[in-house]
Image: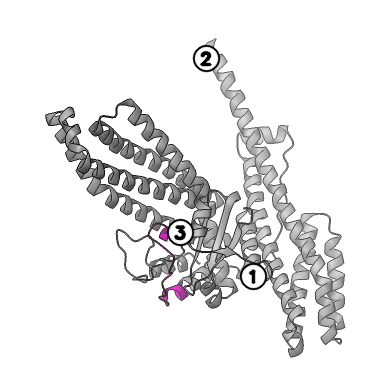
Amino acid sequence: MIIILILIIFLVIAFIAIYNRLVVKRMRVKNGWAQIDVQLKRRYDLIPNLVETVKGYAKHEKEVFEKVAELRSRAMGAKSPKEAADANNMLTSTLKTLFAVAENYPQLKANENFLKLQEELTATENKISFARQFYNDVVMDYNATIHKFPQTIIASMFNFKPREFFEAPEEERKTVPKVKF
Amino acid sequence: MRDTLYDLIGANKRKTFIFIIITSLFLGAIGYVVVRYLNWGITGYVFFAIFIIIYNIILYYNSDKLAIKATGSVPADPDEFRMLHNIVEEVAIAAGTPKPKVYITPSPAPNAFATGRNPGNASIAVTTGLLEIMNRQELQGIVAHEMAHIRNYDILLMTVVSAIGGLIILLRDFFLHSMFFGGRRRSRKTGGQLGLILLLVGIVLAIVAPIFVAMIRAAISRQREYLADASGAYITRYPEGLAQALAKLRDQHTRLKRASQSNAHLFIANPFGKDRADAVGLFATHPPLNNRIDRLTSLVI
């Protein structure tokens, strides 16, 4: 009798512990996504300023400006992490082109406002990639946990679903050095 | 991979705990000897226990302010030091911690340190000399190293280590003082053999304690530096940034004026600027910079 009682108590405690772990991990994923979102919005806000500044010196580079504007609005309208990731990766490479174009205009490169915007965008790009890295790490951890036994039983009971990764751009995945312990 | 790092953080917290236990026992032994020797009785023990606890709590809650004050650091202006603020924010995002407060230490010696009792109450300070010689990526590597100290709870560990170390030395002085000025009268009361044994134990502790403390502190500090390098590289996934920064630190030898032995372990490189490239000693708070660079470069595939 006592043994059964102890067993039940043990199971209840284990159940609560696992459930709480899962909730914490799911919160981390949500929090990670919110971080990315904040940085993406910051980038959307910076882009029009940048385009205006560059336009003042390089009127003829219409194509790049149009492409940046188009990708920006597409990224802003994205609904799932995958859509947002795709649009933003294209936006990243177009912004690189824009900065490459700016290299040809010495006066623009000396413009203080441009330099400030460049630092802000560099920082935002870094924040996006770090936020993505953090998000992907917590998603991997969360996805692995909900597939482990016995967590998987509780996960399926309470509808813990696997989450999508925020994919890095193709060329970055090849060049970024990875650390192994 | 992430699990490994979390495991390391867990191990660090456990080590802190074990260290506190061991040194508390050590302190208790000294306290016992002193109290027995002075014949203070039970009130003596209670006094000691309360003293130790209060001392530690005060140190713990003021660790960040103390280090900031001692080095003469000032808050970094968000406009003037825009890039530094950006870098700290980036690294905080990568580490998944809140953004620490940012300070500037007015000194031509390139160095940086982190302080604070937990990631929510942390500060990072860099010297003006560091900002002058480092580029964006190197600065990011250094900030990531400091962030790793914060996230690994190294500041808590080192604060506890330093606090207990300071306390042991304080007790030693107290003991020596009372031995020379009030010892004779009391030893008669304690009586012959026991008094003599206590006296001998006290003298041995008095000599050994500071050496023991300095060695333990240095050994823990060196291990923390290696770990912070590795987890800093893990935070940015770019070990070259930190490796280049360390190489630059190796090639200069300016001393930081307002550093002292008691806060040396907080800095990214030994603030005393001597023998930093290759020397390793029992009392060194930092591993040789060349070893650190080698370990970092071997992290890359």
Question: Is label 3 in contact with label 2 (beta carbons under 8 Å)?
Answer: no
Q: Which percent across, then down, holds residue B75? A: 60, 63
Question: Is label 3 in contact with label 1 (beta carbons under 8 Å)?
Answer: no
Q: Quick check: B212 left or right of B51?
A: left
Magenta run includes residue B263: yes
Indicate whether B30 appears above or below A179: above
Q: Tag 1: Cα neighbours inside 10 Å, few (<14), some, or many (≥20)?
A: some
User: Of the residues shown, which amino acid type is indicated by label 3?
Assistant: Leu
The residue drawn where x is 54% and y is 17% is: A6
Q: Chain of mark 2?
A: A
Q: Which percent across, then down, holds residue B171? A: 31, 43
Q: Nearer the viewer, residue B182 or A65?
A: B182
Which residue matches tag 3? Answer: B266
Q: Which percent across, then down, holds residue B200? A: 17, 40
Q: Which mark is residue B81?
A: 1
User: Mark 3 or mark 2: which is in front?
Assistant: 3
The residue drawn where x is 72% and y is 86% is: A110
Give the magenta-colored segment's residue range: B247-266
Magenta run includes residue B129: no
Q: Nearer the viewer, residue A64 or B150?
A: B150
Q: Which mark is residue B192?
A: none
Find the distance from the CA under tag 3 to the CA under tag 1. 22 Å
The image quarter containing residue B27 is: top left
